């Protein structure tokens, strides 16, 4: 097996007359922290869904650990969706939500082995005290911890997150990034994260994928977040953290 977690070659996705993604090609080394950035509607979530095997490419190829998304062992993949996709009125407690990362379904009852694994994952993200709290009574930051626990309960080698900082405060964001980096250090996992948080992009990622339906740039932040690339993606530089990065990187 080679040293790449993800390999993408000439990927395009089209929905009837709508081109969601076109001409993406990259190789993502194992143990990377990748930020995926771009304006709304740029195809970022579509790209993750291709990697998850939920959407098939119109053209091109995608490999995860040398296999297609539908061939790869699902235990190797962890995923944290956007919060807005979750029904928080569902009558469940946190440990049950974490357990679904093991079983792919809601449990009727938890055996001791399942409880131990779910509790271990909660402990990894500092959320053991939330195990029996209803998910509807969790704050944004608490729910983020539980969702992260759910995504790592199988100890995946590729962890994907879709705008994980949405709905949590600045302290919660920093806690989450520390947890992600701690998990990555402990497991050697590759992390891919869709984000609009430029602080996270410039301080935590060692690779950046800049998208606006097409691949504007992929590489280290100092290469990808160049002024020309940002203008191509956004039409202007409207992000103060990105502008600050440019100023700092230019002296």
Image (spheres, grey):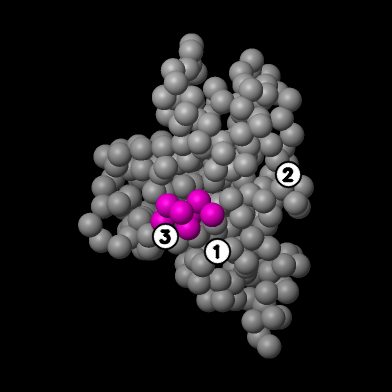
| Distance between mark 1 and mark 2 Cα atoms | 20 Å
Residue at 67%, 62% in the rendered image: 198
Image quarter hosting the N terminus: bottom left
| Element assignment for label 2 | loop
Name above or below for residue 166 compared with residue 251. above
Who is closer to the viewer here, 50 or 145?
145
Magenta segment range? 182-188
Residue 212 on the magenta segment: no
Residue at 69%, 36% in the rendered image: 142
Q: Residue furthest left?
A: 1
Judging by the rendered image, the residue that carries numbered circle 2 is 168
Dot placed on the residue nearer the N-terminal end, 2 or 3: 3
Q: How many other residues sit within 10 Å of disc 3, few (<14), some (14-19) or many (≥20)?
A: some
Rendered image quadrant of residue 22: bottom left
Q: How many other residues sit within 10 Å of disc 1, few (<14), some (14-19) or many (≥20)?
A: many
Rendered image quadrant of residue 80: top right
């Amino acid at each position: 097996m080679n040293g790449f977690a993800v390999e993408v070659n000439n990927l395009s996705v089209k929905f009837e007359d709508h081109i969601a993604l076109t001409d993406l090609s990259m190789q993502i080394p194992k143990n990377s922290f990748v930020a995926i950035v771009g304006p709304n509607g740029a195809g970022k979530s579509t790209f993750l869904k291709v990697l998850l095997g939920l959407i098939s490419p119109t053209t091109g190829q995608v490999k995860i650990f040398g296999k297609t998304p539908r061939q790869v062992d699902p235990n190797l993949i962890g995923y944290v969706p956007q919060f807005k996709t979750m029904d928080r009125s569902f009558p469940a407690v946190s440990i049950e939500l974490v357990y679904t990362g093991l079983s792919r379904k809601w449990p009727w009852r938890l055996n001791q082995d399942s409880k131990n694994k779910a509790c271990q994952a909660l402990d990894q993200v500092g959320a053991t005290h939330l195990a029996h709290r209803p998910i509807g009574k969790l704050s944004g930051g608490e729910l983020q911890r539980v969702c992260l626990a759910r995504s790592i309960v199988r100890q995946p080698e590729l962890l994907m997150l879709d705008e994980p900082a949405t709905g949590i405060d600045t302290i919660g964001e920093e806690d989450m990034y520390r947890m992600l980096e701690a998990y990555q250090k402990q497991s050697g996992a590759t992390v891919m994260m869709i984000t609009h948080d430029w602080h996270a992009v410039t301080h935590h990622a060692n690779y950046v994928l800049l998208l606006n339906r097409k691949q504007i740039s992929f590489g280290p932040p100092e290469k990808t977040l160049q002024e020309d690339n940002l203008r191509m993606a956004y039409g202007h530089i409207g992000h103060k953290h990105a502008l600050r990065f440019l100023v700092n990187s230019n002296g």
